[in-house]
Each structure stands twice: as C-alpha cells, then as structure tokens.
Image (cartoon, helix red, strand yellow):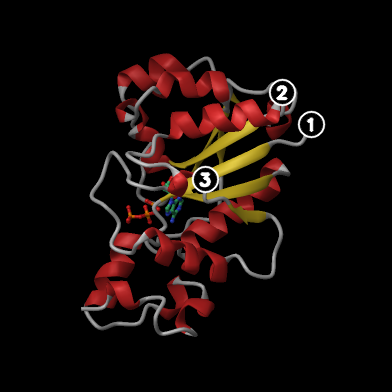
Amino acid sequence: MKPLAIFGGTFDPIHLGHLCVAWEASELLDAEVLMMPSGIPPHRPPPIASAEQRVAMLRVALRDQSRLILDTRELARSGSSYTVDTMVELRAGHGERPLVLLLGADAFAGLPGWQGWRRLFELAHIGVLSRPGEQALLPDELKRETHHRWVDAPAALRSLPSGKLIALSVTPMEISATRIRELIAAGREPRYQLPSGLFDDPGLLAPYRR
Ligand code: ATP
C-alpha cells in the first residue's frame, strides 16, 4: 500500500528548504505528504507569525502541485500540539496504511524530548531527512530504541503500518527559518530562499519586518 507521509513544523515561514526536502521525500517514498503546521509548539518559543498568517503562506507555497497537501488539523486543537496525538488520530483514520513521519535530522536527534516519543514507532514509521550541519550524533536512549528499526529501502515500509526507520538522503538545503526571520528583520529580502509567491503580497512577510 502506498504510504502517507507527514511533515510537521512551525513553518514560520515555509521556505524552499522545507519544500525541496518534502518533495524529494514524496518522490523517494512514492507518497503524498501532509504539510502540517503546528499550533503551540511545546519545545520552543511561539512562532512570530500567527497560525492564520502561516497557513496563508503555506497556501501560496503549495499552489500548482498535488503531492504536498496542507493539513491544518493541529491548529484546530487547543493547548500544546503534540505529534503523538496527531499520529493517534491519523492512525485511527487510515487503518493499516503505512504512515511515515518525516523529521529533519535536527528534529530526529531531539526526539527523546518529545511527549510519548516511543509510542510514535507503534503508530508510524519515521523518515529522517538529511540536513546540512546535522551530524549523526544521536542520544544513547534514541540509539537504544532505534538501532533495530533501520531499513535501507523505501519498499520495506510498504508492507508494515509502522515501526521502521529510514534515512532519506535529500539535496542539502542550507536554509533555515531562523535565518530568514533575521534577514527580513534586518531589512533584507531573502528572495531566493522563499517561494516567489510570498513576495507578491507584501502582507505575507509583514510579521517578520521591524
Ligand atoms: P527554525 O529555524 O524556526 O527552527 P526550521 O527552518 O528548522 O525553523 P521548522 O518549521 O522548525 O523549520 O522545521 C520543520 C521540519 O523541517 C523539521 O523536521 C526540520 O528538521 C525540517 N527542516 C527544516 N529546514 C530543513 C532543511 N533545510 N533541510 C532538511 N530539513 C529541514
């Protein structure tokens, strides 16, 4: 069965790094990817742009293609937004279909700090997207939980609903939302790090201007 992949983030703002790696993951896995903006992230300061503003940017960024699909379910939830709750909900709606949670290498290394992280492997596979500057140094408890889960080929994810781990080698994109926010706040216009449509409406990037 074709898997369904999930790529969550604050997307504050969505940038070409996100889009490029999500697209390549979608090709490597032969899966649609749900692009899922998070509500109130438990592990980090709140986003600068509101949920509505981040969704408006995602809508523009995801125009004219059908592999990457906006899914706003986490924004509808009140309180902190925990990935494990989202995966429980998705699993309930998708029977035995393979689900693949996509995480950048930095997010994967921080997984043991997430609420209910061990349970994620009962609910989904995890696809780790390579990211420039992120070494393969993983915390011991993450290594212990995952060493037996690694598979090499995407085909190995198709016959099981959850529980495997795959490294997805994607084009290195040294782009981060933090850097983009800093550039815009400094009066710069990081035109070729963001989808061009974000520059067509001057209001879209307004939250980051000083
Ligand atoms: P910030 O700088 O605000 O932390 P970010 O650029 O890391 O933002 P997030 O919205 O926090 O973006 O990231 C969502 C997901 O995308 C995370 O799993 C993160 O690891 C991954 N990601 C973001 N940028 C890249 C990139 N350039 N290459 C690979 N993965 C990425």
Q: Position of residue 99 (x, y in %)?
A: 63, 32
Q: Which residue is mark 3?
A: 73
Badge 3 or badge 1: first in the primary sequence: 1
Q: Could you tell me if the residues under marks 1 and 2 are in contact, i.e. CB atoms within 8 Å?
A: yes
Q: Which residue is mark 1?
A: 1
Q: Position of residue 201 (x, y in %)?
A: 46, 84
| Secondary-structure class at tag 2 | loop
Camera-near label (3 vs 1) is: 3
Image quadrant containing the N terminus:
top right
Camera-near label (2 vs 3) is: 3
Q: How many marks?
A: 3
Circle 2: residue type: Glu
Q: Which residue is mark 2?
A: 96
Circle 3: residue type: Arg
149 or 39: nearer the eye? 39
> Which residue shows up at 39% across the image and 58% down it?
51
| Secondary-structure class at tag 3 | helix
